[in-house]
Amino acid sequence: MPGGSSGGSAAAVASDQCLGAIGSDTGGSIRQPAAFCGVVGLKPTYGRVSRYGLVAFASSLDQIGPITKTVEDAALLLNIIGGHDPLDSTSADIDLPDFTASLSEGIGEIRIGVPDEYFIEGLDPEVESAVRTAIKLLEKEGASVKPISLPHTGYAVSTYYILATSEASSNLARYDGVKYGFRAEAGDLMEMYLRTRAQGFGPEVKRRIMLGTYALSAGYYDAYYKKAQQVRTLIKQDFEDAFSEVDVIVTPTTPTPAFRVGEKISDPLQMYLNDIFTISANLAGTCAISIPCGFSSSGLPIGFQIIGRPFDEETVLRLAGTYERETDWHMRRPEL
Amino acid sequence: MRISEGDVEHIARLARLELDPEERRRYTEQLSDILNYIDELNELDTSSVEPTSHVIPIKNVMRDDLPQPSLPLDEALGNAPQRKGNFYRVPRIID
């Protein structure tokens, strides 16, 4: 399977149905499918791209970004979609550089941090080996590499699944069958709401709405929602501390290559744990890119992730561009 | 944290979701599993940590208070499942 949730975009790019595509990334939905499909996926910094017109899932985490065949294409698309928009108050009113300008500059004195917490039990050995090889190549190109720690990484999945589902339960309240979209037949208004939403949403969306509603409900708000917001602060501080020592952080994008259709669907928790390496960038509001760095022995693409400081997409793209020039993984496609 | 089918029924009502008995059973089990996992957050002492609701420090973004055209009525009502005149039409609210 192509991954998700912007798996359609990634599959369309990988199968040459288009030059590039747009995805939306709340916890990895651009980067994970890009890694699974062997293409480039960039989640810009929160606020870099207007969310106007995007169906809101978790408003404090959602960000739109490009899925492309090359790093240069990602830079070109970001030039077009980036910048302040009066119709999205959370889009940042700061300068938009030409992201293609620095692509050919080489990586210079970039300091790369490699967090211990991302090379853990459960990480597929072939993924680990491909990512470590990529890091060695970047070192050869002149980057300095040092181990770092992001100590609250292990709590990111829990934090994310409280905050994202809480925000989603509120955002998706608009699908009530009154103003637009599907409406189920019913005798009175309450029954119409209950049936419209029961029939209109799929099982995963319902599960998330239920979890979010629970976390926000009377008596549980402090224990779940506020607690998760506090842990989010700790995760954000981890990144701020790390970025005082290094310029970028390099990690695997996903713990494993693509899994089979239906393989994880019966165990939602296992499925959520697959997002373990991508969600922290959303919680901390940083930018991050996934680029191809190899194939597994069964022929599935592997990607690695470069996480940059907020609004420093230039450095991330420059490093990714250097890697891409020195390798040809992005030119290869998995057999179907 | 283990939740009961009654809790699930209550949450479903708050979320305006009608569940069949099978869904109620399944969500009771799955939400309990997820909440159990999430309880790991209690390992962290956050008593002196400020909550983060948003990564960019912005608040109350205002535009100038000038009259301007808003969404035309026909566009606003254009996607409604049912309309009546200038209103959204919904099933009976009062007996």
Image (cartoon, coloured by chain):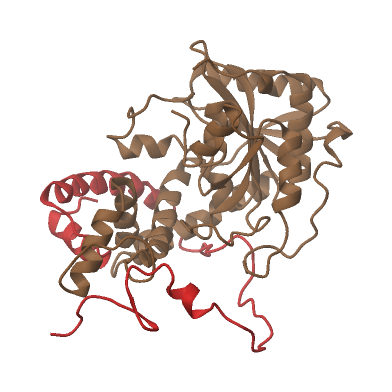
Residue A198: percent from left, percent from top: 24, 56
Residue B13: percent from left, percent from top: 21, 65
Vertical arrangement, residue A313 with respect to residue B94, above or below: above
- Please identify the residue farthest to the top as the structure is shown: A297
Q: Quadrant location of residue A76?
A: top right
Q: Quadrant location of residue A306?
A: top right
- Identified at 54% across, 77% down, the residue is B71
Q: Colour of chain A?
A: brown
Identify the chain drawn in red. Answer: B
- Identified at 46% across, 63% down, the residue is B47
Vertical arrangement, residue A225 with respect to residue B2, above or below: below
- Any part of residue A225 in sight: yes
Count numbered badges in the picture. 0
Q: Look at the image and tell me in which quarter the C terminus of chain B lies.
A: bottom left
- Identified at 46% across, 56% down, the residue is A57
Residue A313: percent from left, percent from top: 73, 45
